[in-house]
């Protein structure tokens, strides 16, 4: 609570110079490690669509504030889905740009090898406006159509997600935006677990000095996760890094000469506080972090009980996938 930054982070400084009005900071998962935003020190972030339900995380406060109309846009960090998961649960757009395209100066990291600064907004156009200020343009890449990334058997999808995504694919086909299906032959759960281990190890390196100096400022849950990661054998960490390294070119190869890959963002909609936390929330989102590629989450309708559902596009150029996401959102009427 008493750790007050002496200066803006580089991305915030860029926004301020461009004329943005900075309103304040928002709640998040402790240490950016988690996807619920039930912070033991600052409380729960409620989902604007339904009280008592999570807004996702780790940047849950950012997505909830945008969805509730409290601000035009908000920043967050995405290590394995922490911008796109809350965007999905709150029914807004969320862009994780290319790795390193937004400066990380002044941002307290969790996992420097996986972290990305991203943007939440209520439209693709607003995401693009903010990203153009805080980030660097992506290199040129082929234009054209997307492929549908088939995650059947690799990720658990609710019936609502399956139905909404099937409709999304049909609309994308009608718009002439897709040219077939591709499948990723990897264990998504294993990749997500490897990314979590790397995050815990790198997070411990970041916070070790402060944990030693002020242990009372860390919840037992957060501290325990970091310590567990640090206690794992070095060969286990090396294996996780090797598996992630192999997945990067595999994702690139699936995109090939296309604009990107269309897939669901999460396997389900937001869940109630107190319900079991799905371990697989980041199974699909982690792919873009591992590959260091831009990925945008965008609304694809509502579940049967009225909660937002989300699709995402993983590509090579943030500007291009944002434009496609905006076009598809209009096509399905969200």
Image: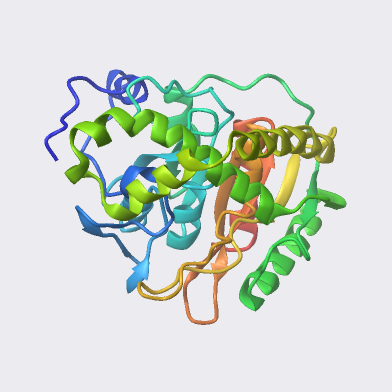
Give the image location of residue 55, x and y in percent. 38, 61
The relative height of residue 292 versus residue 266 in the rendered view (above or below) is above
User: How many circles with numbers are drawn on the protein?
Assistant: 0
Q: Quadrant of the N terminus?
A: top left
Seen at 17% across and 45% down, the residue is 216
In the rendered view, does 164 fall on the left or right side of 174? left
199 left or right of 187 in image:
left
Residue 8 seen in the figure = yes
Its colouring scheme is rainbow
Residue name at image x 67 percent, y 68 percent: 156
Give the image quarter of residue 309: bottom right
Q: Quadrant of residue 204?
A: top left
**x, y percent for residue 103:** 44, 20
The single residue placed furthest to the bottom in the displayed view is 305
Percent x, y for residue 179? 87, 49
Q: Nearer the viewer, residue 145 or 106?
A: 106
The residue closer to the viewer here, 206 or 58, is 206
Q: Is residue 130 above or below residue 159?
A: above
Give the vertical position of 41 relative to 236 (above or below).
Answer: below
Q: Nearer the viewer, residue 258 or 226?
A: 226
Rendered location of residue 326, percent (x, y): 58, 47
Say if residue 62 shows up in the picture.
no
Above/below status of 254 relative to 334: above
Q: Quadrant of the C terminus?
A: bottom right
Q: Is residue 50 left or right of residue 258?
A: left
Residue lying at 54% horizontally and 29% vertically, measured from the top left: 113
* Residue drawn at x 37%, y 24% as measured from the top left: 11
Q: Which residue in the rendered view is the most extreme toward the left?
A: 2
């Amino acid at each position: 609570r008493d750790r007050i930054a002496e200066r803006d982070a580089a991305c915030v400084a860029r926004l301020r110079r461009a004329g943005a009005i900075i309103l304040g900071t928002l709640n998040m998962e402790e240490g950016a490690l988690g996807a619920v935003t039930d912070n033991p020190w600052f409380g729960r972030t409620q989902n604007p669509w339904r009280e008592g339900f999570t807004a996702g995380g780790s940047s849950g406060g950012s997505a909830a504030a945008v969805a509730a109309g409290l601000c035009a846009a908000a920043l967050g960090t995405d290590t394995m889905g922490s911008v796109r998961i809350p965007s999905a649960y709150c029914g807004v757009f969320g862009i994780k740009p290319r790795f390193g395209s937004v400066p990380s100066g002044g941002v307290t990291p969790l996992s420097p090898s996986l972290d990305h600064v991203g943007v939440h907004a209520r439209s693709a156009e607003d995401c693009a406006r903010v990203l153009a200020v805080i980030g660097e343009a992506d290199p040129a890449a082929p234009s054209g159509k997307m492929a549908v990334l088939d995650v059947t058997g690799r990720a658990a999808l609710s019936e609502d997600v399956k139905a909404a995504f099937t409709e999304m694919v049909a609309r994308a086909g009608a718009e002439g935006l897709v040219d077939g299906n591709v499948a990723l032959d990897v264990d998504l759960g294993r990749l997500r677990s490897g990314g979590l281990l790397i995050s815990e190890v790198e997070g411990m390196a970041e916070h070790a000095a402060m944990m030693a100096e002020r242990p009372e400022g860390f919840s037992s849950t957060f501290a325990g996760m970091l310590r567990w990661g640090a206690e794992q054998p070095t060969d286990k960490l090396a294996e996780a890094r090797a598996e992630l390294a192999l997945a990067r070119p595999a994702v690139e190869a699936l995109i090939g000469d296309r604009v990107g890959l269309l897939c669901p963002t999460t396997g389900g909609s937001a869940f109630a506080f107190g319900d079991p936390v799905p371990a697989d929330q980041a199974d699909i989102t982690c792919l873009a972090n591992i590959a260091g590629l831009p990925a945008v989450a965008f609304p694809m309708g509502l579940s049967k009980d009225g909660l937002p559902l989300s699709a995402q596009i993983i590509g090579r150029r943030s500007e291009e996938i944002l434009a496609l996401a905006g076009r598809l959102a209009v096509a399905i009427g969200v």
